[in-house]
Image (cartoon, grey):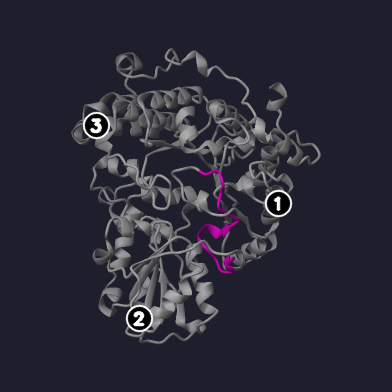
Amino acid sequence: MGYDPRGVRFVLTAPETESTEQGFSPWKQMVYASVPAKFAPRFLYKKYLNSESYPDGTARVMPLGLRIVEDILREHYPQDDVVLCHPENLEKFVGPRTRVVGVAAHNPIGVAFSTGVYSSIFGTTATPINSYESTRVYNNPAIRKYRPKVIVGGAGAWQIEKMGAFEQLGVDCVIVGRAESVILDLFRQADEGKELPQVVRAPEPKLNELRVPARRSTYGVVEMTRGCGRQCAFCSPTLETRVSLEQDALIEAVKANIREGGRCIFPVSEDIFIYGAPPPFYIPKADALVNFYESVARVPGVDYLPLSHATIAPALVNPHLIKELSGVLLNKSVLRNPASSHPAKNFISPLIGIETGSPRLAALTMSGKALPFDIRDWQDIVVEGINILNKNNWFPVCTFIVGLPGETDDDIKQSLDLLHRLRKMKILYVPSIFTPLEDTRMASGHGLKPRELTQLQWEFILTAWRQSLDFSVVRKQSNFAWKAGMYGFYYLRGKWIHGPQFKYPAMRFAGVAEEKISPHLYLKWDGSQVRPEVAPKPPRLIAKHADTTLEQMNTRQNRNPFPILQQV
């Protein structure tokens, strides 16, 4: 293409941390939201970002959201008027003719859930790497010189409004929500020199507005579903209408990614088990799900096929489905661990939100996660579900939220009890501090600062980290280095930042002998603190859904749905 040397009308970009396909593992990208930039000089990680460009400077790979914007704009403007490029090439395309720079934002200010613990543990001013990389985009010399309108969208765009960072970053307009229905009008207004609204709250797109762009996206992301329906109070996607995108269109997007040099395809969802599922959505439609993943895996050139978000209850609903998916996905996994029974030691690692071990708190904030079971049995659902997953070489990344509004000491103790019940299972824990997200029912809740955490809350976080460390870091030298690092951090910095309540939890992570610290902590490694009421029992099916559930279950041959219910 011949681009105008005076600049391209519309330029789309994203921080390099959002375009990297490091290690073909999407979870590695999460690290950039956790590590403080001031402790990681850019030269140490720049080589891992590896943002690919064509000879003319345009991007080979970009986040899916920008590909959708590109698709919409190119329907209404000449091809040469729309460019996607990485920040390092902005000066090639931004000039006096440029009307808009559109920026994808995942964590522009550094107040995402993960940042609550993993960056701010080093101090409240510790900006994570992906936030630092975002700032580099907004401060780009070409943008500052020519002053095009800057429109920001994406999962983290709300942070700019919440923190009042418009002037600081030079942002003209923030789109909160899905942008399909508003993006064209906003770019047109900017193109005509009109003033833009500072904040646009985009309505949920209609079915005919959904896009499956045929260009290569980061990690080969294709959006298999939208929405969720489990109605968790701290989550915004659950408020969106559940939609499963057509398999034929998704496969075309897969082929397009491969044609443009991709090797990894990442079908994303708030819960993979709702794909193609009719009401009641919490009963997986096994045929649709297995056929979809089989179709993706059969496309020549698809080397890696990771799993997205999932819920735990469907593992109990249909264990045979887990086994079938393992047969499709294990050979397409880049992840390896000696604990896997796979011949190549491959394993699968979906992201599963456990959030709390307290059935009381779960009932208040996320009762839908247990369906079709009773939320009162939340711990048993989690324990039995993880057991089923582990048997099939699914070693999930499990999130927990500390500091949910209404959380009590007893709730935290129950979460610690659950950690003890899961101690021998293959899990990587990601505990975070509650962050009130926009457009959720908990948007007005109080997000704790690390200094406000109680000793019990620190005990949960650092015990979860310790169990993750002992499972995932199998080299003794590396395991020891992590523990020694925490010991040194506590005495050099941690005790001053987080106070005395941080001490004994930090010492547990550091590997100090349990007999020295257990008198000061709730959880005992021998389980002596575990309450009798947490003895395993079969989860109860919610009675009002029982008949509907059983009638609508997928009964594909050789499947045995609800094996646990036969014991009830």
**Residue 498: where, in percent of width, then height?**
23, 34
Give the labeled residue for mark 1: 294
Q: Counting residues from the N terminus, which is met first, the one under dot 1 or under dot 3?
A: 1
Amino acid bearing label 2: Lys
- Mark on residue 490? 3
* Residue at the image position 46 percent from the left and 43 percent from the top: 233
Q: In this view, does 339 lie above or below 215?
A: above
Classify mark 3: residues with Cα within 10 Å, few (<14), some (14-19) or many (20+). some
Classify mark 1: residues with Cα within 10 Å, few (<14), some (14-19) or many (20+). some
561 displayed left or right of 463: right
**Residue 554: where, in percent of width, then height?**
75, 42
Task: Please identify, in this view, whether the residue under mark 2 or under mark 3 is nearer the observer.
Answer: 2
Give the labeled residue for mark 2: 194
Let me know if residue 249 is in the magenta part.
no
Amino acid bearing label 3: Tyr
How far is disc 1 from disc 3 in space, using C-alphas? Answer: 48 Å
* Residue at the image position 43 percent from the left and 12 percent from the top: 528
Q: Can residue 358 be seen in this view?
A: no
Amino acid bearing label 1: Glu
Nearer-the-camera pick, 414 or 208: 208
Q: Counting residues from the N terminus, which is met first, the one under dot 2 or under dot 3?
A: 2
**Residue 224: where, in percent of width, then height?**
61, 56
Range of magenta residues: 209-231
How far is disc 2 from disc 3 in space, using C-alphas? Answer: 54 Å
Q: In this view, does 84 lie above or below 237?
A: below
How far is disc 1 from disc 2 in space, using C-alphas? Answer: 49 Å
> Circle 1 sits in a helix, a strand or a loop, which is it?
helix
